[in-house]
Image: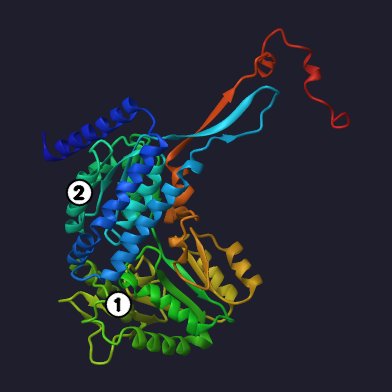
Amino acid sequence: MDNTSVIAATLAARVGAMKNAHVHDGPASAALRQDRLGRAAQLLIGHHAELAAAISADYGHRSTYQSLLADVLSSVGALRHAQASLTQWMQAEEQAVPGPGMQARIEYQPLGVVGIISPWNFPLNLAFSPLAGVLAAGNRALLKPSELTPRTAGLLAELVARYFDPLELGVVLGEAEVGAAFSAQAFDHLVFTGSSGVGRRVMRAAAENLVPLTLELGGKSPVLLDLDADFGTAIERILTVKTFNAGQICVSPDYLLVPQAARETIVGHARRFMAASFPTLQANPDYTAIVSDSHFARLQNLLDDACARGATAIGLQPAGEAQADPRTRKMAPTLLLDPSDDMMVMQEEIFGPILPVMTYTDPEQALAYINSHPRPLAAYYFGQDAARQRRFSERTTSGALVINDVMTHASVETLPFGGVGPSGMGAYHGIHGFRRFSHAKAVVVQSADGQSNLRLRAPYPDSSTLIKSPAAA
């Protein structure tokens, strides 16, 4: 048996054992679900310093503040929210019935065993945020962290084994070969966060077992600054997110559409924001490195290609510092003025601190541009007029829309988080995750006299009495 077959067989045995335990033990009670959620939160809080250090080591340098806020505390928030809301979420929903004496309700039933493939950019958040819904719904889970953050993945495997029985929650480590075998397992549901290209392969593998999927695939999230936008405030909020994790975020702004007359104003605001927020970058503990040499090289290639094709690069690094240093893998935010669709930077998700700035003369032109491209995971609109805000919302389709800010929706547990079309399918967070990872079972209790059944029984009455004429109705 070759290595690939051994990996697949080992994973199949592990998933099978978890499925058997799920059936044998019966549905998890509310108390057990809350206990599992609580243990997951304790794991993160109790080992936050170790986890933040592991993430930073994987990156070369990652801001401790960013790791604690975006990976630890946000995940704990999702788990605690599920704990507090669980009893209400688990209640059956009574429904209208077709006849007297009948009962009809929707009961939310655990699916069984859920696989979660999480990426490197938020290695805890994008594992534990969906896990909150998975555990709240009464499921067991198997995590496959990214091989690009091996220290974090290894520590996570060690900690999960301390806090959970392996038949409740486990971690699978390994390179891409293991990831491919993982996505081909007969899970009861599979969650994948990552690129569209890998997402297609995961979907094909899951289809062999008809495994339902939640895919969060990112894409190019646009930002439209309307004619009446407060440009200074807009740029501050946009760059706040574009510099967070060095722009390595699936809902990071991927390109700006700004009024042509405001182009130089935008550049000025960007320079002032960076000077105030990051007087230094290379030695600044608040600024995060690019995760790997290959990703660093890819981003530099995007810049080189764009400049070779006519774009103007405006580096926002402090005076006396390089735009990028391959030794630290720290790369300054860079505006790309006048990009065109033939440039690689406009054809793929950037996932870094490069920000193309396109101009328009008519807002309808900008709207048409957004709609001529694949539907993004998020869209952002800056403008003061309520009617124009509403028009943008109605005329564009995206996983989420944020008005006069960027990425705010991702931290709101009561809102669904997910994509649409090429940016993904399905959503989680809060009750939306609970329902996503539950089976909504229809339950009907027949009345004592069985009237709704009797109407199906022969001999039938005269069929002319079944349908009334419009006049009679």
Name the element at disc 2: helix
Residue at (23% x, 71% y) in the render: 296
Which residue shows up at 77% across the image and 21% down it? 466
Residue 157 numbered tag: 2
Q: Quadrant of the N terminus?
A: top left
Q: Identify the image quadrant of residue 250.
A: bottom left
Q: Is residue 462 above or below residue 199?
A: above
Residue 100, percent from left and from top: 71, 23
Q: Residues within 10 Å of mark 1 (few under 14, many from 20)?
A: many
Name the residue beneath numbered marker 1: 303
Q: Nearer the viewer, residue 464 or 45?
A: 45
Residue under the point 34% across and 61% down: 73
Is residue 325 at all visible to an observer of this figure? yes
Find residue 162 and report its horizontal and vertical position in percent: 20, 45
Which tag, 1 or 2, sits closer to the chain's start?
A: 2
Name the secondary structure under disc 1. Answer: helix
Q: Quadrant of the C terminus?
A: top right
